[in-house]
Image: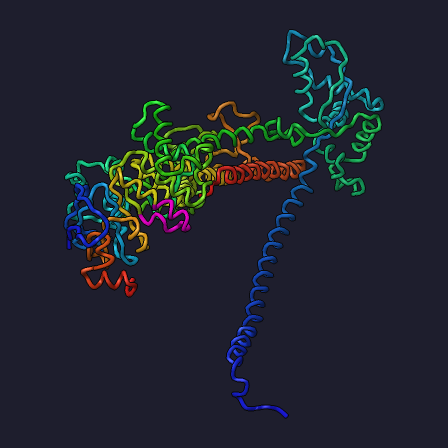
Amino acid sequence: MTDTTPDSGAGPRPINATTDAVRKSLSRRNRKQLILQGLGIAAISFAMLMLVILIGSLVSTGYQAFTQTHVELEVYVDPDEISEDNLPRGGFRDVLSDSMGQYFPDVDMSDRVAAREVSSILSNGAQFTLRDRIVADPSLIGETITLNVPVSDPYDQLAKGLVKRDTPEANRRLDDAAIERFDRLDELGMVSKPLNTGLITNADSRFPELAGLKGALVGSFWALLTCFLISFPLGIGAAIYLEEFAPKNRVSDFIEVNINNLAAVPSVVFGLLALAVFINWFGLPRSAPFVGGLTLALMTLPTIIIATRAALKAVPPSIREAALGVGASKHQVVFQHVLPLAMPGILTGTIIGLAQALGETAPLLLIGMNAFITSAPTSPFDSATALPTQIFIWADSPERGFVSRTSAAILVLLTFLIFMNAIAIYLRNKFERKW
Amino acid sequence: MYDAPTPRHSDVQETHEIKIAARDVQVFYGSTHAIKDVDVDIEDKTVTAFIGPSGCGKSTFLRCLNRMNDTIDVARVEGDIRLDGEDIYDPDIDPVQLRARVGMVFQKPNPFPKSIYDNVAYGPKIHGLATTKADLDEIVERSLRRAALWDEAKDRLDAPGTGLSGGQQQRLCIARAVATEPEVLLMDEPCSALDPIATGQVEELIEELRRDYSVVIVTHSMQQAARVSQKTAFFHLGNLVEYGETGKIFTNPEDPRTESYITGRIG
């Protein structure tokens, strides 16, 4: 027997009706929350996957550039070719060629073509290594010395397994005879693959086995230093004035809108501006890290101003009131209370702005920082490249050896970026205060 | 509206000099007329309480007395406010100098994120009240004693002021305010963020401070106004409705609005 009358059990009914409704909507709400969470996890996973692919591909192509194949030669420094009176000139190339000849008795080294083929195992830079060594110690003339020099790019590729031995000879960069010669040196135990310190200590070169990032690193350092010294004080000054002192009217609104717009202007535009103003009008030197720094400062300035204003705004008004209440003047409030409290935020914003500037390529291309320069700059006014433009140059180079070097350079750049971001996080955590 | 003390009330009131005289004060926030025609005389060595419902303008008026409203761009103050007969809105008066004479304690304890010592020493330092470290030490100790915080804080003067409990923080703020030897102390709901025990301590402190200062306190608690003040002003919708002896306001208000408020019908 069922009770169908609606108003039996009068008491708990309304409560049940509410809980039923809540339960129904609850499952819907929970489902929505699950979907949202799922989407979030999917987005993060996708981003992580892309990051892993990026780093993975960079490492897998770039790791080869962190080693460099070398050969160790016994070199007789022939006084007939190299004399003490004539340094640093001399027949270093011929001395090396003769030295190579002793390992290949079957090759007639008086045949220039054959001799050149044998010597091609050595990097073009080997003669300069020898020269530097002799110039540093002329008493070595007439002695036999041991010289450890890089091999040229094709043989380096061979040693790293990037030249496949089983491809038909015609499609290979090295013919069978060349591979055989290299293998003989290898059997003699002359070939080694040490860490490629040249990647950091050498400047750029036409030969991949000699090319390094020193010029780019020093150039980036000078450019970033210039950028920091200009944009940090200017940016903080502008932000303090706008946030704390400027009257709120149409002029300050106009300035604010323009600063926000500047932060969104494509960087290549700043490069054109710098080309027109700094180089053509002021007559500053082309390709100089100083000009690069000025250009990057133009870009970083809005970022720093916006970050600083946000940091100043985030200081609780109670602190300002407290200082005003004991009779501090406006500038005492700003410089003794607000600014110190805003400093972590300002520093974080500045470092992130500088990290952006470090990776910026387009404006530097326009002011000529993509020149081919084989020595590191000694001052901010010397011609130089920067890390991102060096990557650009290498990525554009036809030699096979630059493929791995490009990836290695990107890894170096990423290392610096991660380092700078780590500093930003460290500063934020260290100086963050609770109130 | 300005009643002389009546013998009916048990508080024995001596008449004090008038410290702050406000006449015809108007405050505008943009186009909002927040304070209308307020006339009030605040006496020296007296606790004056401002009561009234939220948004009635009592805090706004309090902030006129040390020109804290200057820091709000849209606020505009008209009328005449005199401290010891001197117009505080005179262009020759620097608000910095005024605020050294008229100290302020805020609703939420707001110590600087610095050490207890530096919190108290800050005012004397910027005003050049101490020439030597020993002088400064003495001022800090005296101020902390006056704020009844010395015993709790003397062993950790280098500890951050923000690490104290809420009640201690508020007493630190009072110490900071009295360190510059102000003549008037403005307190904007100083106990609203405190528990009853801390409130009791601050109220005792206010009673102490009355010996040396003129204290003006804004409060939402009518019991507090009744406990600590000798004079009470009731604000409603930007008007000063009634001002007089505290005892009279609470027992025999003249205006029906005052009566409604203290009996809980409006507010």
Residue B82's x, y, as percent? 16, 42
Q: Which span is picked out in magenta?
A: B188-203
Note whether residue A14 is visible: yes
Vertical placement of A197 versus B104: above or below?
above
Q: Which residue is depicted at the point 74% across and 25% down?
A: A119
Q: Nearer the viewer, residue A428 or B243?
A: B243
Color scheme of the displayed model: rainbow
Q: Which residue is depicted at the point 60% across and 61% down?
A: A38
For the C terminus of chain A, the quadrant is top left
Residue A404's x, y, as percent? 66, 38
Q: How many labels, in total?
A: 0
Q: Is residue A354 left or right of residue A124?
A: left
Vertical placement of A410 versus A4: above or below?
above
Note whether residue B74 is visible: no
Residue A223: in magenta span: no
Residue A164's x, y, as percent? 77, 41
Q: Which residue is depicted at the point 25% across and 54% down?
A: B57
Q: Nearer the viewer, residue B158 or A252?
A: B158
Would you identify the image quadrant in which residue A202 lies? Answer: top right
Residue B156's x, y, as percent? 46, 33
Residue B190: in magenta span: yes
For the N terminus of chain A, the quadrant is bottom right
Would you identify the image quadrant in which residue A9 lies? Answer: bottom right
Vertical placement of B139 versus B22: above or below?
above
